[in-house]
């Protein structure tokens, strides 16, 4: 049995044992006979909001008055638009995914220049680190998840502030409260992907509009937390009741991710044959 990126922690507090299932990647990447774990785990620690310990890649909070004043002064003197000389970038390590990223990228490429690196594009000049060095010169990063999974937000979204890039995302559900307001462009907020592409092209040309996507920095601050720190906090606060997941397989596979279908497999074949299909919400 293989379980992808699944780690089990055995935590000891004198004679109390707590078994925790911990993972950060979409459930669609797990396979095997999960029934063997029924009746084993006490807590869940994942990116899902219904986990006992909510464990996203990133979070945000309102800035303090002092932070707001400091950031506002900084933004007055910054023009991120003028620091960029390229449009959009995407780095993928996997091409044939359930999210059909390949279709979305192709449609957007009709409106803006998208440079592709990784498995689905050009190789990085030297290694993956050299790909990371490309980021500062790009205005947009296509931060698409490889699966549509409830509550899952890729770490690629949370890394954009350090490069002063606008993340282009493909979220089919409402993530209010999980992501920073006005910090991204969601292609599914438009009537179709073409409309999203036309809007992104406008932002690509408009200095004022582009810089407006960084106004959120005056009001919010993003941060990441140590995963084990979350675990430790939960253990010490004792806020989670004594429990055992008798149907752990059911919880883990509770229809949270879009699964591969015959249609999605055929779609990739049709894509390779240059046959176009329309992507709907």
Image: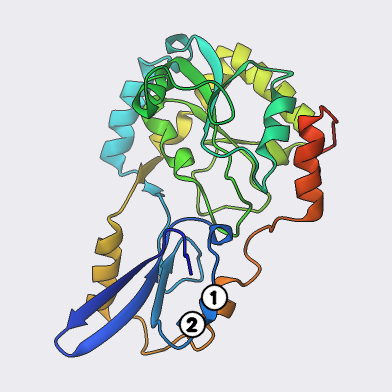
Residue at the (14%, 87%) spot, across then down? 14
Q: Name the disc covering residue 105, or none.
A: none
Tell me the CA gap for discs 1 and 2: 6 Å
Classify mark 2: residues with Cα within 10 Å, few (<14), some (14-19) or many (20+): few
Residue at the (62%, 72%) spot, across then down? 254
Pointer 1 with pointer 2, Cβ within 8 A: yes
Image coordinates for residue 230, horizontal then vertical, percent: 30, 64
Q: Name the disc covering residue 36, or none.
A: 2
Q: Which residue lies furthest to the front in this view?
A: 1
Q: Name the disc covering residue 33, or none.
A: 1
| Viewer-side residue, 198 vs 8 | 8
* Residue 192 can be seen in this image: no
**What kind of element bears circle 1?**
loop
- Left or right, 170 with respect to 262, comes to left
Look at the picture and state if 63 lies above or below 177: above
Look at the picture and state if 44 lies above or below 47: below
Classify mark 1: residues with Cα within 10 Å, few (<14), some (14-19) or many (20+): few
Q: In which quarter of the image is residue 204?
A: top right
- Left or right, 183 with respect to 108, comes to left
Image coordinates for residue 81, horizontal then vertical, percent: 48, 14
Q: In which quarter of the image is residue 247?
A: bottom right
Residue at the (40%, 48%) spot, across then down? 60
Residue at the (50%, 66%) spot, across then down? 49
**What kind of element bears circle 2?**
helix
Look at the picture and state if 83 lies above or below 33: above
């Amino acid at each position: 049995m293989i379980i992808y990126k699944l780690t089990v922690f055995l935590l000891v507090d004198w004679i109390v044992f707590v078994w925790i299932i911990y993972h950060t990647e979409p459930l669609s990447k797990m396979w095997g006979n999960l029934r063997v774990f029924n009746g084993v785990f006490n807590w869940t620690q994942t990116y899902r909001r219904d986990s006992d310990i909510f464990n996203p890649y990133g979070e945000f909070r309102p800035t303090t008055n002092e932070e707001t004043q400091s950031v506002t002064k900084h933004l007055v003197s910054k023009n991120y638009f003028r620091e960029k000389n390229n449009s959009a970038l995407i780095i993928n390590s996997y091409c044939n995914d359930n999210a059909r990223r390949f279709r979305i990228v192709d449609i957007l490429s009709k409106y803006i220049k998208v440079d592709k690196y990784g498995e689905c594009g050009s190789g990085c000049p030297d290694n993956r680190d050299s790909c990371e060095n490309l980021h500062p010169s790009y205005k947009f990063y296509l931060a698409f998840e490889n699966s549509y999974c409830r509550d899952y937000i890729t770490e690629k979204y949370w890394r954009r502030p350090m490069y002063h890039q606008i993340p282009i995302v493909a979220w089919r559900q409402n993530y209010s409260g999980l992501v920073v307001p006005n910090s991204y462009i969601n292609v599914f907020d438009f009537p179709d992907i073409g409309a999203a592409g036309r809007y992104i092209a406008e932002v690509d040309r408009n200095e004022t509009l582009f810089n407006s996507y960084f106004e959120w920095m005056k009001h919010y601050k993003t941060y990441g937390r140590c995963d084990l720190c979350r675990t430790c906090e939960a253990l010490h606060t004792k806020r989670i009741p004594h429990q055992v997941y008798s149907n752990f397989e059911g919880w883990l596979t509770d229809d949270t991710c879009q699964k591969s279908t015959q249609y999605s497999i055929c779609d990739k074949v049709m894509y390779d044959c240059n046959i176009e299909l329309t992507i709907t919400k």
